[in-house]
Amino acid sequence: MNGLDRALVAAAVAISPPAHRATRREQWAADVRDAAELDLSSTALAFGALTTALFHRRADHRTTWGETMSATPRSVRTAPHVVGTVPVLIVFAVLSALGSVCGLALLQRYNGVPGAMAVFLADALAASVLPGAVVAGALLLVSGVGLRRRVIGAVAVLAVATVWFGITTGLVNLPVHHPLQVGLVAAALLGVWLVTCRRPRWTWSLLLLPVVAALLVAPLGDALAGSGLPYSALAVVYGLQQLVPFLVVIPGGIVAARLSTDHHSAFVEHDEALVDKSA
């Protein structure tokens, strides 16, 4: 159990009902420590413990997660990560990007105001690096993949997010049409996810989805440029237009997971849960 796992389990125990802390501490520490024997991610289980403690704070009885882990390892193997942490992180990344679109619209009222550039850079970070960091964290929680591979994938996601930050701020300019730049960055993000999760090579064809989406929505901004709409409204359209290819990445990942022969899906919930929701 590494330092992060210990910290997560300690936090989960601390926010658990007092009467159940001792039992949960023993169970969760043992489950996280023995995760490797079940081909599970110890960090994912530690996050699962924290999620359980947060959503079952008023539980009348303790979770049966520890009993499930120790008594039925075969069933656990078929459901390596079912606490929903990864989907929640992906949703958070999308919300961060959507929030940046709203921020970009508000910034239109303060063009030329001293200090506006700093706010713009912060908004660009919320649209690129912050979602990238969240997705990188989600990738670290994927089960059935070696830690080294997950770390390399997370670093690659951060690199893609940094490139996107450079594009949004004008610091980076790829030698292609701007809508295609957006599609390529989104495709690179999906590609890192597919490779890290060991999806079959045929799923690489899904990389065309964000590229096609970027090219399809590109004419919308051009059509509205001379429509007389307020700059704030145009900024929203522009932001959503750039967000579409990244949103397409999500169903692309889901399709790759469901149609893949690899059952260790990071997007799809399994039938049997590690956490007793009735707790």
Image: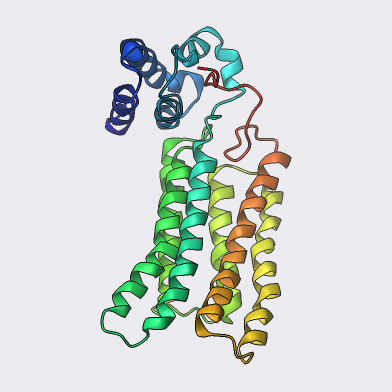
Whether 245 is drawn above or below 50: the answer is below
Q: In this rendering, would 30 be left or right of 201?
A: left
Residue 205: percent from left, percent from top: 70, 57
Residue 240: percent from left, percent from top: 58, 69
Q: How many marks?
A: 0
Residue 24: percent from left, percent from top: 37, 15
Whether 116 is drawn above or below 100: the answer is below
Image quarter in which the N terminus is found: top left
Image-quadrant location for residue 238: bottom right
**Observer-nearest of 205 and 255:** 255
Whether 10 is drawn above or below 178: the answer is above
Whether 47 is drawn above or below 237: the answer is above
Look at 53% across and 49% down and name the residue there: 91
Image-quadrant location for residue 59: top left
Residue 61: percent from left, percent from top: 45, 11
**Observer-nearest of 120 and 34:** 120
By what rule are the colours in the image chosen? rainbow
